[in-house]
Amino acid sequence: SLLQSIPFSYHIDNKNLIRFLNKTVKQRGIEILDAEVVNVNLDDKEFVSSLETDNGQKLSFDLYIDCSGFRSKVLGQALKTEFIPFTSTLINNRALTFDTPNNGVIAPYTACSTMNNGWCWTIPMRDENHHGYVHSTLYCDEATALAEVRAKFGPIEKYKMVEFRSGRHKQAWNKNVFAIGNAYAFVEPLESTAIQTAVHSIMTLCKLMPVNHQDATSIAAINQEIAVTWDTFRWFLGIHYKYNKHLDTPYWNACNENTNIGDAQMIVDLFQQRPPLSASN
């Protein structure tokens, strides 16, 4: 446990955080170009030669950091980097998000509730609770998800449906592009790993920054370290589904029977054979 050295964590309002980061970046003299990338140009070696924006600018750099989220505008769309799906482990592909009033009572923890076809987060903020019912369209349509949410949390009128896919690209660094966060990979939000994986990717890049684009050894090391980290999260999350016996529904029965936990199987086998493992054992 990290509790002795880090005895707390934060729930951060995303909009306020973005405003704070924008202010900090500008104070440090870093230019922010508010424009949409509409086209990615490649040269004859299929390296990115320039980006074209919706305001008519053409931008050319040595290295491109793709932070375009699920769209993966450069790494995925332009370079067509192979995508490895995690569907044998994580079958959820949609989240129904909504807010409820907290009536001034702010819980000091995030709740993860088992639902008939997935799970629901409850994140307390200052003025309301934020929720998201993460589920699989293989077992649950929108009307079913909404009915289950209303039965548990009350009359929900405003909500948003977010589509996603779990998996990662084969490479985080490809040609002259390095992708961070959802532009490279995504595992569902059950253990809130998004910030951690983004920080890890940045630290890995800083630690192993290639001398140039021909530095194949450094690039391979970057790709391997980041891939292993994401795969570890995949197996870690898979354990939650394979061994959750809380509800007897078709969704959970399928998770119990079919979830692939990969490299985590050795840890489970050790746990079943020996006393619980510790840092010194």
Image (cartoon, rainbow, N blue to C red):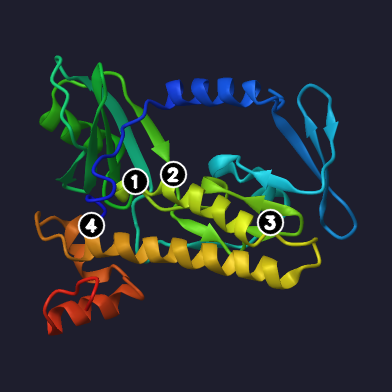
Q: If you read the primary sequence from the N terminus, does the residue marked by circle 3 or circle 2 appear first?
A: 3
Q: In front: 153, or 20?
A: 20
The tag on residue 195 is 2
Q: Return the disc, 1 or 4, that comes first in the chain's sequence.
A: 4
CA–CA distance between discs 3 and 1?
28 Å
Disc 3 and disc 2 in contact, CB within 8 angstroms: no
Q: Dot 4, crowdedness within 10 Å: few (<14), some or many (≥20)?
A: few
Closer to viewer: mark 3 or mark 1: 1
Q: CA distance from mark 1 to mark 4?
A: 17 Å
Say what amino acid the circle numbered 2 marks: Ile
Q: Name above or below for residue 222 compared with residue 126.
A: below
**Mark 1 surroundings within 10 Å by alpha-carbon count, few (fewer than 14), some (14 through 19), many (20 or more):** few
What's the residue type where badge 1 is placed?
A: Ser
Measured in 3D between alpha carbons, the distance from the residue under mark 3 to the one under mark 2, in whole angstroms, is 25 Å
Q: Would you name the residue on which mark 1 appears?
A: 192
**275 lies above or below 165:** below
Q: Is residue 121 above or below residue 153?
A: below
Residue assigned mark 4: 1
State if disc 2 and disc 4 touch (CB < 8 Å).
no
Which of marks 1 and 3 precedes in the sequence?
3
| Residue at left offset 60%, top offset 40% | 68
- Amino acid at the residue labelled 3: Lys
What is the spatial separation of the Cα atoms under label 4 and label 2, in whole angstroms? Answer: 19 Å
From the top left corner, tell me how far across and down residue 139 is, in percent.
26, 51
How many callouts does the rendering have? 4
Residue 33 quadrant: top right
Q: Residue at x 77, y 68 (%)?
A: 215
Please, what secondary structure does the residue beneath circle 1 have? loop
